[in-house]
Image (tube, helix red, strand yellow):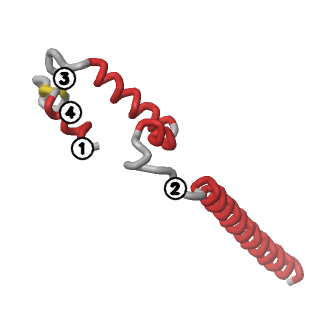
Amino acid sequence: MADVLEFQEANTIPVESGTEYTWKEGVNLNCVMALQEFFRAIRKDSTAIYAYLDPLEISLVAKRDEVHRMVKEEERKRRKRKKKKANKELEKEAEVRLNEERERLET
């Protein structure tokens, strides 16, 4: 990543507005296109980074997919419990209102 930032800083110049940059003349456009392709691929699917980087620099985490499934399952269970709890609270509120209405009608 530091190499990318260094390349970008060395090969860009600020535009008149001061907030945007443009590429200098003579920049290797193939390198720029390769960097763009790299970042697009990673934004599309984060696991694409493993196709671009040396396995000695970065490697897949052991059991990553299994852990990801477990996390998703726990999130699903938590949402289900939360929804069930909210439904119980609504039922209790409805029952309280019904009892209050019955008492009011009896008197």
Label 1 sits on a secondary structure element that is helix
Question: What residue type is disc 3 on?
Answer: Thr
Q: CA distance from mark 4 to mark 1?
A: 9 Å
Q: Position of residue 14 (x, y in %)?
A: 12, 27
Q: CA distance from mark 2 to mark 3?
A: 38 Å
Q: Position of residue 47 (x, y in %)?
A: 51, 43
User: Which numbered disc, 2 or 3, marks the residue that appears first in the sequence?
Assistant: 3
Q: Which mark is residue 11?
A: none
Of the pair 77 and 33, the residue shown nearer to us:
33
Residue occupying image coordinates x 29% and y 24%: 32
From the image, state whether disc 2 or disc 1 is nearer to you: 2
Residue occupying image coordinates x 24% and y 44%: 2
Asked if residue 40 lies left or right of residue 95, the reply is left
From the image, state whether disc 1 or disc 3 is nearer to you: 1
Q: CA distance from mark 4 to mark 3?
A: 13 Å
Q: CA distance from mark 4 to mark 2?
A: 29 Å
User: Which numbered disc, 4 or 3, marks the residue that appears first in the sequence?
Assistant: 4
Residue carrying label 2: 61
Residue occupying image coordinates x 47% and y 42%: 50
Q: CA distance from mark 2 to mark 1?
A: 23 Å
Q: Which mark is residue 2?
A: 1
From the image, state whether disc 4 or disc 3 is nearer to you: 4
**Crowd band around label 3 with a 10 angstrom C-alpha radius: few (<14), some (14–19), many (20+):** few
Residue carrying label 4: 7
From the image, state whether disc 4 or disc 2 is nearer to you: 2
| Up/down of 93 relative to 7, above or below | below
User: Which numbered disc, 4 or 2, marks the residue that appears first in the sequence?
Assistant: 4
